[in-house]
Amino acid sequence: MRFPSHLKGRFAAFFLSAAAASSAFAVPAASDLPPAPILVLNSLDASVSVIDPVKWTETQRIGTGKEPHHIYLTPDEKSVIVANSASDSLTFLNPRTAEVQRVVSGIVDPYHLRFSPDMKWFVTAGNRLNHVDVYSWDGKDVKLVKRIATGKTPSHIYIDGKSTTAFVTMQDSDELIAVDLASQSIRWRVKTGPMPADIFGVHQDKTLLVGLTGGDGVQVFDVAGPEPKAVGILPTGKGAHAFRSMGDGKTVLVSNRVANTISRIDTASLKVVDTFAVPGGPDCMDVSADGKTLYVTSRWAKKLSVVDMTTRQVVRQINVGRSPHGVWTLDHASR
């Protein structure tokens, strides 16, 4: 428990002893807090649907900028950022209450966003304007360091665990690039299969998985050396798009948006071990803290689909806004 700095001397001693003697002063344990809401980004409605994970209803709809597509937690976990790509802005929300904290303007075309693990860099992909922006992060604000011209339609970003490299897919020029964060320059560029989207690193980031939304699988790249090497393609289903770790360090999910399925990939063997149906164009995903429940945006159906991961069955769907894309909750499994 923290106390204001002005509580000093005898009053502070009294306050501390009283707090120790009475539960009235106790800080609630995490288990005593109400479950955090599930946030769904309605990309064509410029809003976020706030879902109660107990009643499974939409409790409110929060206005954002135009085309909110992706969402990411700040390093201090005090805010979650909604990137509004067509409004050139970021909306900061309280991750536990969904209350709007502030809006930051002047962030040009932030379609996708990531923080580096060392909390030094904030990177955005300009999907419309064909650039990647590298910002510095001081714990509160971002400052543009460099704008990097890229290929056509930068899509998704993955930053390695050492915070040295940002890997970015080019959706319409079918490329994967590596950006050196220290120099803010492109280190290498390699061709991919059709319409590359999300990226996921395995084997201590020596191997990258790339969803091929214009194809029917996940392309594997060996990036351990100075130049990338295409290893092969894991057949998953048409429209392979977004990844989400199950949080067990063993399994990653990929949504196959055209096939209306989700595949589980064993990260050690790089084999597809299971595929199950989720309707409506499954897109982004999040996993409950206990790993038992999967939340999936059904992009074409205006719904959030909820999957019981024990049975791999959709157990409910909640109506949300148009073209739901990103989904996120504070009470999630490890990423």
Image (spheres, rainbow, N blue to C red):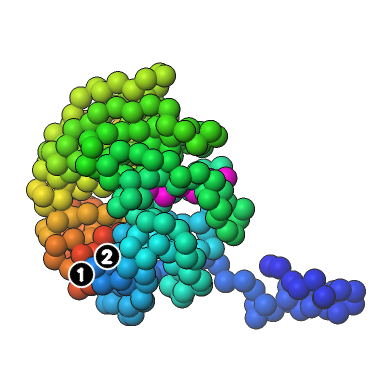
| Numbered disc 1: secondary structure | loop
Q: Residue at x 33, y 80 (%)?
A: 60
Residue displayed at 51% across by 56% down:
74
Residue type at mark 1 is: Arg
Can you tell which mark lies on residue 269?
none
* Identity of the residue drawn at 90% across and 77% down: 10
- Image position of 322 (left or right of 221): left
Q: Earlier in the sequence, mark 1 or mark 2?
A: 2
Q: Position of residue 243 (x, y in %)?
A: 28, 45
* Magenta residue span: 120-125
Tell me: 13 left or right of 64: right
Front position in the image: 192 or 198:
192
Q: Quadrant of the N terminus?
A: bottom right
Q: Give left or right: position of 259 versus 161.
A: left
Amino acid type assigned to the residue bearing label 2 in the image: Ser
Asked if 318 appears above or below 278 in the picture, the reply is: below
**CB-based contact (under 8 Å), mark 1 and mark 2:** yes
Residue 90 inside the magenta-drawn segment: no
Foreground: 322 or 51? 322
Label 2 sits on a secondary structure element that is loop
| Percent position of residue 214, x then y | 14, 41
Find residue 262 and report its horizontal and vertical position in percent.
Answer: 18, 48
Residue at numbered disc 1: 322
Residue 43's disc number: 2
Answer yes or no: is residue 313 visible.
no
Q: Is residue 296 visible?
A: yes
Q: Which image quadrant for residue 303?
A: bottom left
Q: Between 125 and 156, which is closer to the camera in this rendering? A: 125
Q: Residue at x 65, y 81 (%)?
A: 24
Residue 112 at x, y percent in the picture: 36, 52
**Magenta region, main secondary structure:** strand
